[in-house]
Amino acid sequence: MKKNNMYKFEKAYWSQGNKYILGLDEAGRGCWAGPLVVAGCILPMNYKNDEINDSKKLSAKKRERLFEEIIKSAVAYDIEFISPIDVDKLNPKQATISGMNDVYHNIKISPNVVFVDAEKLPNIKVKTESIIKGDSKSISIAAASILAKVARDRYMISIAYKYPEYNFDVNKGYGTINHLKALKKYGPIQKFHRFSYRPIKEVIKK
């Protein structure tokens, strides 16, 4: 039976008595439209769920089920939405960092350590582990990735009723062929598309 390595980083800190590990991740950084969503999750010490993995590797149905399981089991969690206007203003990387700082400061329990998927967070004062491809290596980051992805997908599905021509319920704001066709036909939506992104700029130019 293949060993699950999603607990390796957590176990190293749990074994030293660090009860509260905050995992951080984002969803929607590369999207052309809609918010960037950052989530943070503190799981119980020695928590185990072998189904939790990088949200991109899971079906939508499984993500939805795990979302409910995570928020029910978590010691604490927080989900922050960064508007397209702020993503344009800050740039995607800085918007992600800003959202992660917000989660850290707003979550109801102060963590002993923070695990983050790839980013460096200079304004966080506790021990921080920046883990490359962390959503595939840390259950805390993977849980955060599921919270962020499901929260964002639900929002984009709700917005699709307002803007049906863009098929946001299907593309979730990502750059698909049909999304580009809708952009060329109807133009970008003020305050909802990301006007600093090249495909949007090119549509505006034409």
Image: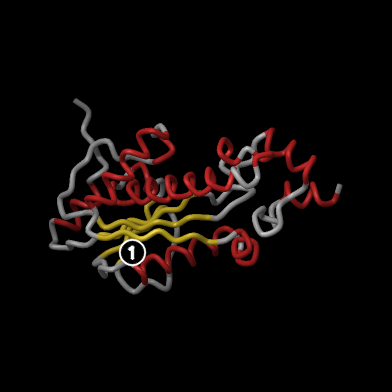
Q: Residues within 10 Å of mark 1 (few under 14, many from 20)?
A: some
Which residue, given by chain and number where applicable, does mark 1 sit on?
A: 128
Q: What amino acid type is highlighted by mark number 1? A: Thr
Q: Relative to 174, say whether 189 is above or below.
A: below
Residue ID at (59%, 52%) = 34
Q: Nearer the viewer, residue 110 or 121?
A: 110
Where is residue 181 drawn, in percent x and y? Answer: 74, 36
Residue under the image location 58 percent in, 58 percent down: 92
Left or right of residue 8, residue 190 in this image: right
Query: Residue 194 placed where, x, y %?
Result: 66, 55
* Picture mark count: 1
Residue in front for this viewpoint, 204 or 138? 204
Q: Is residue 172 left or right of residue 128?
A: right
Answer above or below: position of 181 versus 127: above
Coloring basis for residues: secondary structure
> Residue at 79% of width from left, 40% of height from top?
185
Q: Secondary structure at mark 1?
A: strand
Position in image of residue 119 (x %, y %):
45, 58
Occupied quadrant, residue 58 = top left
State left or right for residue 189 relative to residue 76: right
